[in-house]
């Protein structure tokens, strides 16, 4: 089992920036894809960004492309989400997730961190 702990959420004004971190512990693997997801009130969960095990390949949703950057440091089992030019519609609980090794199925989830963007 992999445990994921997110940090870095908070309240920020529109146009501001935040950096989320997610550190994995337990049965970590170098073949794990990592991702950030979010759920806003009254909406379904949305994939924000994902990153391949090596970090060489990334995916972004159209709503965050050009503003958010996902990265990872495998030496410390941590994935980051740099969020710039934040908008009120980015307000949500952000979740970190890890895939089963060698797959794209996200099976391990963090507890979530709240991001609130005021206008």
Image (cartoon, helix red, strand yellow):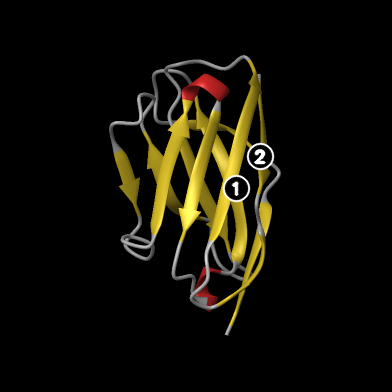
**Helix, strand or loop at mark 1:** strand
Q: Is residue 50 left or right of residue 62?
A: right
- At horizontal 32% and vertical 60% (from top left) the residue drawn is 65
Q: Could you tell which of marks 2 and 1 lies nearer the N-terminus?
A: 1
Q: Is residue 88 above or below residue 81?
A: below
Q: Is residue 15 above or below residue 60?
A: below
Figure quadrant of the N terminus: top right
| Image quadrant where residue 53 sits | top left
* Residue beneath disc 2: 110
CB within 8 Å, label 2 to label 1: yes
| Image quadrant where residue 91 sits | bottom right
Figure quadrant of the C terminus: bottom right
* Residue beneath disc 1: 95
Q: Is residue 27 left or right of residue 44?
A: right
Local packing at callout 1 (Cα closer than 10 Å; few below 14, some 14-19, many 20+) is: many
Q: Is residue 113 above or below residue 58?
A: below
């Amino acid at each position: 089992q992999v445990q994921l702990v997110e940090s870095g959420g908070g309240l920020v004004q529109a146009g501001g920036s935040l950096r989320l971190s997610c550190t994995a512990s337990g049965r970590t693997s170098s073949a794990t894809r990592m991702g950030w997801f979010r759920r806003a009130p009254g909406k379904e969960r949305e994939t924000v960004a994902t990153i391949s095990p090596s970090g060489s390949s990334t995916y972004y949703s159209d709503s965050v492309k050009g503003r958010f950057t996902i990265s990872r440091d495998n030496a410390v089992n941590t994935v980051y989400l740099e969020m710039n030019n934040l908008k009120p519609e980015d307000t949500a609980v952000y979740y970190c997730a890890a895939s089963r090794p060698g797959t794209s199925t996200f099976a391990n989830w963090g507890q979530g961190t709240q991001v609130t963007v005021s206008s």
